[in-house]
Image: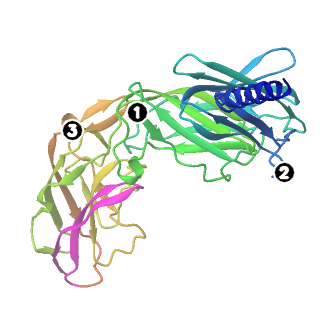
Amino acid sequence: MRDKALLGVAVLCTILWILTGCRPTPLLYDVSAQPNPISPNADGVTDVARISYKLARHANVVLYFTDASGTRYDFRTNVPRPAGQYEAMFSGVIDNRLLPDGFYTCVVEATAENGERASVQVPLAIQGGEPNAIEILNLSIYPPSFTPNRDGISDRVTIAYSLSKEAAKVQVYIVGQDGSKYPVPEDKIRPVGQVGAHAHDYDAGVDLGATPPPDGTYVVVVEAEDAVGNRAVARGQLSIVDGGVPQVEIVNSAAEWSASIVPLGGTLTFTCTVRNIGKVGVRTKGAPPGTTYTTSENFNSKQFYEEPGIFRVGMDYEGNSSGRTYPFRWQLGSDEELTMVGDQRYLMPGKTVTVVGHLQIVDRPVKVTPYYWLGLIHEQVWIVQDRVEAIPVTIGF
């Protein structure tokens, strides 16, 4: 009888061992959040929690936090994961904002392909977190509409704002209606991310010869992120009108001269052809073609002062001691050949004009046969074509 009892116990133990050994591993297990608490303040000590978990089978994973009031903060949503061990690094930031100090419950949920579900909760506290989130203040865009075409009128826009605290990363860009993004250069006055006022000078790239974004209305976006991950975004509106890189040329880099010998007191005349080969109009102004200068005059003495962005044909000569290059300058075409935009004259795309200029040589040159030449000048920008058709001219005296 005793032997039968012992045999029964042994059989029962064997059955229990078999059942226990064959029990499937839980779908979700070994869930932890360490260290606890965390202090996300960018001091490099316990700033981030490592949330670890294991999956026994393929599942979709959801990870979120709840506070004492039951408010839910989603961190990961329906992320597919095969069986294995995983870690998620949590800095306390949800939706670009650091959660306030307090006690939270970290919830990891898994749903297998067969519908099996598992959920594990672990505590996590935030203490000593950075109390101030970064803000972008007083975004201004002036002018709100500009014409980046290097004509010297409304070619640039200033994008200004202030940062409430130091930023680890700042991005400024414009976005078109088709989603295209165009970067805005960094503020050259104040270091990137420094607390305080910033101003970005934006020319749409034309100063470097780049084609600007297409004409249209854009959203200006300023993004800033501080050291703990708080992120701020500010938006405004900007319009681009008549944008483009000006392209104009003295055709074939050639000119015709009236003579190679001119008596002192005589007049030297040039004729050249200028064409706008670009896609935007180029601004120009007098002296009108056909104007006669004397060697003792210049464009200022004729009250056609230099202006940033205008194009003119200029004449210069060997031995020029006036203190400025190309002291004699002429408008690109007659008033009748040009298009008025407001009170400004433009040589429009595809237009070709003839420019004639006269120089009366009333002063003795430094040498008997100095060289004379033409140039196409984009004033206060660059000399587009320099020393065009340089010829020696003998001055008789």
Which residue in the structure is indicated by mark 1? 180
Question: Residue 396 at x, y = what percent?
Answer: 16, 80
* Residue 213 as seen in the image, left or right of residue 225: left
Quadrant (top left, top right, bottom left, bottom right) of the C terminus: bottom left
Of label 3 and label 1, which has the lower sequence position?
1
Which residue in the structure is indicated by mark 2? 45
Question: Residue 165 at x, y = what percent?
Answer: 78, 41
Which residue in the structure is indicated by mark 3? 349
Mark 2, Cα crowd under 10 Å, few <14 / some 14-19 / many 20+, is few
Depth-wise, is mark 2 or mark 3 nearer the camera? 2
* Labelled disc at residue 113: none
Q: Dot 1 lies on which element?
A: loop
- Compare residues 261 and 337 and report the one nearer the observer: 337
Mark 1, Cα crowd under 10 Å, few <14 / some 14-19 / many 20+, is few
Residue 215 in view, yes or no: yes
Query: Label 2 is placed on what type of residue?
Result: Val
Residue 65 inside the magenta-drawn segment? no
Q: CA distance from mark 3 to mark 1?
A: 27 Å
Of label 2 and label 3, which has the lower sequence position?
2
Residue at the (53%, 34%) spot, across then down:
82
Q: Is disc 2 in contact with disc 3, using a CB cutoff of under 8 Å?
A: no
